[in-house]
Amino acid sequence: MTPNKPLWSGRIEGGLAPEAWEFLHSLPHDRFLWPYDIDGTVAHVKALTSAALLSKTEGTKLTRELRAMKDHPELVDDADEDVHSAIERVLTERLGDVGAKVHTGRSRNDQVATAMRLWTKEQLTAARTAVASLVSVLADRATEHADTLAPGYTHMQRAQPIALGHWLCAHAWSFVRDIERFDLALANTDVSPLGAGALATSTFDIDPQVAAAELGFVRTFDNSMDAVSDRDFLVDGSDACTMALTHLSRLAEEIVLWSTTEFAFVVLPDAYATGSSMMPQKRNPDVAEVARGAPGIALGALTGLVTTLKGLPLAYDRDLQLDKQHVRDVFGTTIGAFRAMAGLVAGLTFDTERLASAASDPSLLATDEAERLVREGVPFRKAHEQVAGRIDELQAAGRPRNMPGGPSAKSIRAQVRRLRKIVQT
Ligand code: ARG
């Protein structure tokens, strides 16, 4: 394939060696930025118009053409170097010299950072929403099971009786911390780099606020060199996804375990269970398993991205174009995992009898009995020893636990109220 004339062909003689072009052109990895880069370009046109670098008529022409192009990503040509070159090529083919003016005071360095931030803001918002939906489902299920007795585990050994709602809320609280991480990532992404140019702005009097406001960014860059080299927002986003999926994998693992014949605490909803092509009796927890495996994708992106960033000199370096390959799958995987798991958790049938009988194992009351002895004045360590010697005789005489944050129905209802408030905002 003969590459289209690159944007930088004014000084460099002849074309790139085919293998160099093949290696460098980023279109396969950045064509998804088409609508975001078009929005960024529309905003830049507005900034150029308000700086009188484009006439009103030119601005209108460019904006109209860009808006018409937005729904046609097929306009890119495999021979384009990247999505930015493609947009400028199409504009120039259609509008001649007016199209050729669009790159005034702009570099692909601030352009690509802008498009990536626009895309990332959208992804982070969708990921946050997906996490919040699972929190809502967990809160609903916890309300339903505020009084359902279940065994609580430490070291995967039966430890103390709890209410099932407490377990559901425990998972929900870990996702609340993820929501906070997504909010922080969103705030760090919400900065417009447009106007930073290649690294040192431009000689024109372009106000970065104009483009920032048009794009809905809350603020503009503080330093143009930092603006074109900063990819921390992608690190923060990948980190938020890594932690959210890590938490999700813990819930997923418990569901896998609880759906085994050995535990049989839950039955998966039909719409979220898969069969085996060979073994007719199987009811497989594939959704929970893929969710359990998903943190690998996010952590891979996080480590890959940080490895690429490490040691990079200021300002823009071409290494940065690999950012897209690192993060491309992370958000989609996170959003998909949370949506599927929210549906699965909403449809789980808990076997409340089996849960209650596992929780009524007399040995689970050993701590309560030791605490009763403490109330009678026995030092805790001695009480612990005494009770350990007579586990077998303990009877299922459950003691109320009323501490805030504990497993009582009252505490669960309070937790659910707070969870609901958090996900409603
Ligand atoms: N494809 C490049 C990227 O994604 C665009 C920026 C290229 N800038 C440059 N000076 N070569 O980072």
Image: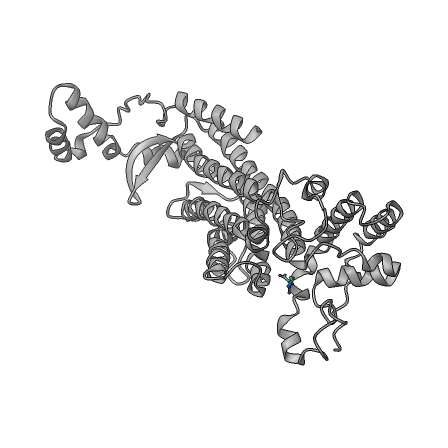
| Residue sitting at x 81%, y 52% | 66
Using the image as rendered, state which of residue 55 and residue 155 is in the foreground. 55
Question: Seen from this angle, which residue lies furthest top?
Answer: 376
Does the image show residue 283?
A: no
Residue 414's place in the image compared with 2, above or below, is: above
User: Where residue 36 sits: x, y (%)?
Assistant: 70, 51
Residue 378's place in the image compared with 161, above or below, is: above
Left or right, residue 223 beside residue 259: right
Residue 305's place in the image compared with 409, above or below, is: below
| Residue sitting at x 48%, y 45% | 244
| Residue sitting at x 76%, y 63% | 86
User: Where residue 347 sits: x, y (%)?
Assistant: 55, 39
Does the image show residue 243?
A: yes
| Residue sitting at x 47%, y 30% | 142
Q: Quadrant of the C terminus?
A: top right
User: Where residue 22 sits: x, y (%)?
Assistant: 65, 75
